[in-house]
């Protein structure tokens, strides 16, 4: 019963574990949905014939032509417009997904559901690692939880592979019209759009490529700067944690920060002020991490790491979360 109680706490009483479980479930559903779409739609090879440019928004959408099972040649726009031109040449092959019942409902095949699902699973594993590394939980509880999650994943995949889910989805589609929005991808070019094909596409693309080459050094400089900064901060935090001494402190107040957003709104932030004692000397440390609302409570006890040679140099012990900025970069 103690193991079941621990699992119950993981599900319902720990926000970090709850987020990991939620992302795991979302990831499984997205991967299952990707497999379901592959089974329920036909896939043909189309080719790039140009791009449409919306003059008002200056957005580009690639246009492909494909031939469906009925022998009729159709166009299919990419579902997402971008401010950037494609770097692909005219004639580039592309997989097109369409419904056999209505080939006008088509879209460029991509693996967005699959990639988002895998990303959710990776993040859920990271969150679970952070949780189990900071909470005293038995190995048996962890194994029981893993067994349940694997069982849940197989159940979801089986449901998406069954006939019942297909029939239910078809009924929902008739009521909600999930696939109707795909018909806009095969609609003719409107007067508000400019079709760039053949020579006009090559001319526009050459101008765009020249602009990319001009700004490429700047982009590389920014990218390498972010990498260098993340490595430097990671090394700095690691070096500090190696020589630091850990003690217990108490949150005594919050330092309020104030700033103005671009739309004129006033934004307040709160950083905890922690009181701690070193060799009988009372010291205070203001966290460098601020949040839009107090993330802790006054009087709450927290672990503090401080430099034994300079006790005023300190930081809150957050484990792997101390490296979250570097991980994001």
Image (tube, rainbow, N blue to C red):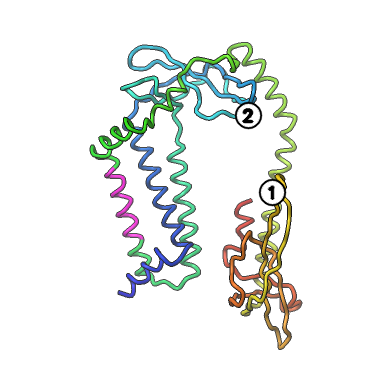
Residue 132 location, x and y as percent?
46, 66
Q: In this rendering, is residue 317 above or below 19?
A: below
Q: Secondary structure at mark 2?
A: loop
Q: How many marks?
A: 2
Looking at the image, which residue is at 63% across and 29% down? 83
Left or right of residue 152: residue 15: right
Residue 155 falls inside the magenta stretch:
yes
Looking at the image, which residue is at 71% across and 88% down? 280
* Magenta stretch in the rendered image: 146-159
Residue farthest to the front, as pictured: 265
Q: Nearer the viewer, residue 48 or 254?
A: 254
Looking at the image, which residue is at 72% across and 47% down? 264
The answer to which image quadrant residue 53 occupies is top right
How far is disc 1 from disc 2 in space, using C-alphas? 24 Å
The answer to which image quadrant residue 21 occupies is bottom left
Residue 323 location, x and y as percent?
61, 60
Left or right of residue 22: residue 172: left
Query: Label 1: which residue?
Result: 226
Residue 302 falls inside the magenta stretch:
no
The answer to which image quadrant residue 286 occupies is bottom right
Q: In this rendering, is residue 80 above or below 293?
A: above
Q: Secondary structure at mark 1?
A: helix
């Amino acid at each position: 019963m103690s193991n079941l109680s621990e699992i119950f706490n993981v599900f319902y009483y720990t926000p970090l574990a709850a987020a990991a479980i939620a992302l795991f479930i979302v990831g499984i559903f997205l991967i299952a949905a990707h497999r379901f779409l592959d089974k329920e739609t036909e896939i043909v090879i189309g080719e790039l014939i140009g791009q449409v440019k919306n003059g008002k928004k200056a957005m580009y959408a690639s246009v492909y032509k494909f031939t469906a099972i009925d022998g009729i040649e159709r166009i299919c726009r990419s579902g997402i417009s971008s401010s950037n031109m494609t770097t692909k040449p005219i004639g580039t092959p592309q997989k097109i997904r369409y419904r056999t019942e209505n080939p006008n409902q088509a879209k460029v095949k991509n693996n967005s559901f699959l990639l988002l699902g895998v990303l959710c699973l990776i993040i859920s594993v990271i969150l679970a690692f952070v949780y189990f590394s900071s909470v005293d939980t038995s190995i048996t509880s962890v194994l029981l939880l893993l067994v349940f999650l694997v069982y849940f994943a197989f159940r979801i995949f089986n449901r998406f592979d069954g006939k019942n889910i297909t029939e239910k989805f078809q009924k929902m589609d008739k009521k909600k019209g999930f696939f109707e929005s795909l018909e806009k991808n095969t609609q003719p070019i409107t007067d508000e759009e400019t079709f760039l094909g053949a020579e006009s596409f090559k001319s526009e693309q050459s101008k765009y490529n020249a602009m990319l080459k001009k700004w490429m050094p700047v982009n590389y400089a920014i990218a390498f700067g972010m990498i260098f900064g993340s490595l430097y901060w990671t090394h700095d935090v690691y070096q500090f944690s190696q020589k630091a001494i850990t003690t217990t402190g108490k949150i005594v107040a919050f330092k309020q920060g104030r700033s103005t957003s671009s739309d004129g709104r006033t934004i307040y932030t709160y950083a905890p002020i922690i009181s701690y004692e070193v060799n009988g000397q009372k010291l205070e440390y203001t966290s460098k991490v601020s949040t839009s609302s107090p993330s802790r409570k006054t009087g709450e006890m927290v672990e503090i790491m401080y430099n034994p040679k300079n006790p005023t140099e300190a930081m809150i012990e957050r484990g792997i979360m101390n490296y979250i900025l570097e991980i994001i970069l």
